[in-house]
């Protein structure tokens, strides 16, 4: 279990796998100054698929320590909630639906958990995909059936309910069947009218087959964590991405092999390629707003200023490292 020291002042945590490598460690102090927050950030690294005691110790620590105000949870958001759901005094509607926690915050003496991904993934998707794109018949291939993929389908379900365009077909692949079964169960509870296919793909070659079957203008998303938490890509080097389509990696750091594969096809296939930077900005600003109970716009001059601060800070760090 992680060793957790009491915070000496207002502190927010990042619960992940390799948090020290994240840009947020350099960006947060700059954002805190911009937002007028007297607070620091600490990382808590847990192994992938950690034991329940590890997750419970983190949640209990944040709950009991008076200066620990909350946390953003990445890779562990499903497992953490399953292991420690009884420690939360309240959860948001999407937390109960998705059975995950990506944001831990306090309301007085109460500890609350929220699933922010339906909001942050939707904001990111809207920033990446041109208006009216899906009306042309493009499809969506989600490589990986974890919490981020499930959250994105929830956003699309709500988008369709508002009468807006959505992918004509959504294909979700995963190496193991239980994640696909969990996603299907949530979609059944929702009564979604999205056209979703669930495909077991334990080998990258099977993902390649799903890519080959996509219509022109489709989007392929790496939601597996490969390229960040673990090296590699969910596709082989032989995969041919859809003509005029989009390739989106939820990651922005790591070996990013999926992005390399996509960028190599930009000219030949007319691709638009996006990394996880926009997702990073929306994900963190939404959770910071929740933890510190402040308003942070999702667009406009104030949001753009935070984005510029983050970009300039990470660019300066890369220069200092000789990158």
Image: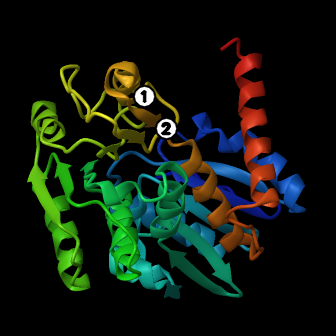
Residue 98 bears which disc, if any? none
CA neighbours of label 2 inside 10 A, class few (<14), some (14 to 19), many (20+): many
Report which quarter residue 136 is drawn in. Answer: bottom left
Residue assigned mark 2? 275
Above or below: residue 86 compared with residue 164: below
Q: Is residue 143 left or right of residue 199?
A: right
Above or below: residue 314 compared with residue 293: above
Between residue 262 and residue 28, name the one nearer to us.
262
The local secondary structure at tag 2 comes to: loop
User: In the image, what residue occupies the spot 32% across and 52% down?
Assistant: 49
**How many numbered callouts?**
2
Q: Tag 1 or tag 2, which sits nearer the N-term?
A: 1
Report which quarter residue 23 is drawn in. Answer: top right
CA neighbours of label 1 inside 10 A, class few (<14), some (14 to 19), many (20+): many
Where is residue 244 shown, x and y percent of the image?
A: 34, 36
Where is residue 57 shown, x and y percent of the image?
A: 49, 64
Inspect this view and state whether residue 301 appears. Answer: yes
Above or below: residue 296 compared with residue 29: below
The local secondary structure at tag 1 comes to: loop
User: In the image, what residue occupies the spot 10% across and 36% down?
Assistant: 209
Between residue 227 and residue 90, name the one nearer to us.
227
User: In the image, what residue occupies the spot 36% across and 67% down?
Assistant: 165
Residue assigned mark 1? 256
Residues tagged 2 and 1 counted as in contact (Cβ below 8 A): yes
């Amino acid at each position: 279990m992680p060793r957790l020291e009491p915070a000496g002042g207002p502190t927010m945590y990042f619960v992940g796998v390799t948090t020290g490598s994240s840009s947020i460690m350099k960006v947060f102090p700059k954002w805190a100054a911009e937002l007028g927050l007297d607070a620091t950030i600490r990382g808590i690294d847990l192994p992938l698929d950690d034991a329940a005691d590890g997750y419970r110790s983190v949640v209990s620590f944040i709950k009991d320590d008076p200066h620990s105000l909350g946390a953003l949870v990445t890779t562990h958001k499903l497992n953490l909630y399953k292991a420690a759901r009884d420690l939360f005094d309240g959860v948001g509607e999407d937390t109960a639906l998705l059975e995950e926690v990506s944001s831990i915050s306090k309301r007085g003496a109460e500890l609350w958990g929220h699933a922010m991904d339906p909001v942050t993934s939707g904001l990111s998707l809207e920033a990446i995909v041109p208006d009216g794109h899906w009306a042309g018949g493009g499809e969506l291939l989600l490589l990986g059936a974890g919490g981020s993929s499930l959250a994105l389908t929830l956003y699309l379900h709500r988008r369709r309910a508002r009468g807006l365009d959505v992918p004509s077909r959504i294909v979700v692949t995963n190496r193991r069947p239980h994640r696909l079964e969990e996603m299907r169960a949530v979609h059944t509870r929702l009564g979604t009218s999205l056209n979703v296919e669930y495909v077991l793909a334990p080998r990258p070659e099977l993902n390649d087959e799903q890519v080959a079957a996509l219509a022109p203008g489709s989007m392929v998303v790496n939601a597996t964590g490969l390229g960040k938490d673990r090296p590699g890509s969910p596709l082989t080097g032989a995969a041919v991405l859809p003509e005029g389509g989009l390739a989106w990696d939820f990651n922005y750091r790591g070996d990013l092999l999926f992005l390399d594969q996509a960028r190599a096809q930009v000219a030949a296939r007319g691709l638009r390629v996006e990394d996880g930077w926009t997702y990073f900005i929306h994900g963190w600003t939404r959770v910071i707003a929740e933890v510190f109970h402040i308003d942070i716009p999702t667009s406009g001059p104030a949001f753009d200023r935070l984005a510029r601060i983050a970009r300039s800070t990470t660019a300066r760090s890369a220069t200092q490292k000789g990158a």
